[in-house]
Image (cartoon, rainbow, N blue to C red):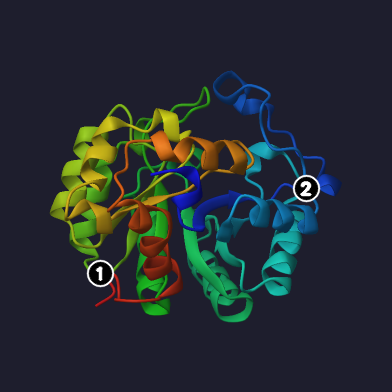
Amino acid sequence: MAEEQIPWIIDCYVNANPPHLDLNWTLTDETYGPAKAHPQALEELVGDMDRYRIARALLAPPPESAMGDPVAGYRWTLDAVQKYPERFGLSVRVNADEGIRAVRHLESMVRNDGARALRIVPYRDGKRASHRSYYPLYAKCIELGIPVTITVGMPLVPRAGIVQNPKHLDRVCAFFPELVIVSAHGGAPWTSLLVQLLRTWPNLYHMISAYAPSRYPVELVAFANTRRGREKVMYASDYPLLTFDRARRELPECGIDDEAMPWFVERNAARVFWGEGAEPAGAR
């Protein structure tokens, strides 16, 4: 498929990176090098999305690793979503160790701010996805009708990451069959196990984030090209670590076939995060 034939994209993993927060992304330099997106004001970000045919994005406040002011980061992200509701959906994080306060915080952000997804990054919390502190949040996600995204695989930064083994999703999928779970990143070195879990559990999906399309894990590409897999795997960038232009440029050669590509870059995300089309398994 030629670059100009690839549909407009929904990017499921975008981090806010406004200039005034003076964020620091050097933790990922060993993996990504200096070729990250420069800080962008909101209008510049939307302009880049237009330029590279990014129809919508699931936007999250800057991660703690970027060392910015978390309150200012959330405020900027919320303002962006409210100013361009047709272009952005809000993805949020909470501190599971705060117990019921975290549950109430999540509910407030969904009901009052329009959050569309809860984001969990186990290595940052130091606990596996099946840890009991997450269970009240999972139950609340079901009640609120939103998916949870959970990073899997060893992190691409020098941090302990065994807690991100996708095997921990198995218990969560079984205990919460109504919870829509979207694993994130590549799952390495357990990608084959991740694919088997995707085959097994109807409520489990995956976004290939933080990987340039030219380096997508072959197991995930092969699964995405199957009849079952094309409705379960979706695109994401992890902007600003991966730039929109590089992703758009490399997508035609990523190995996703012509039949699966529209599902990969747009249809699955529209269904899972925006509720468009058939309801995702797990929400039924």
Q: Is residue 242 depicted above or below 14 in this figure?
A: above
Q: Residues within 10 Å of mark 2 (few under 14, many from 20)?
A: some
Residue nearest the observer in this picture, 199 or 66: 199
Determine whether 167 is above or below 136 in the image.
above
Label 2: state its secondary structure: loop
The N terminus lies in quadrant: top left
Determine the image quadrant of residue 122: top left
Tag 1: amino acid: Gly
Q: Residues within 10 Å of mark 1 (few under 14, many from 20)?
A: some
Image coords of residue 130 (percent x, y): 30, 50
Residue 138 horizontal/vertical position (percent): 37, 65
Task: Return the residue nearer the eye: 10 or 24.
Answer: 10
Quarter of the figure that contains the C terminus:
bottom left
- Percent x, y for residue 202? 19, 61
Q: CA distance from mark 2 to mark 1?
A: 36 Å
* Residue 118 visible at all: yes
Residue 61 visible at all: no
Name the residue beneath numbered marker 1.
282
Res 40 label: 2
Name the residue rendered at 44%, 35% in the picture.
213
What residue is drawn where x is 27% and y is 53%?
259
Q: Nearer the viewer, residue 266 or 20?
A: 266
* Image spot of residue 114 (x, y percent): 58, 76
Q: Are marks 2 and 1 in contact (CB under 8 Å)?
A: no
Q: Which mark is residue 117?
A: none
Q: Give the label, 2 or 1, closer to the camera.
A: 2
| Number of numbered tags placed on the structure image | 2
Q: Residue furthest right?
A: 20
Comparing 137 with 158, the one in front is 158
- Snapshot quadrant of residue 33: top right
Q: Secondary structure at mark 1?
A: loop
Q: Amino acid at mark 2?
A: Gln
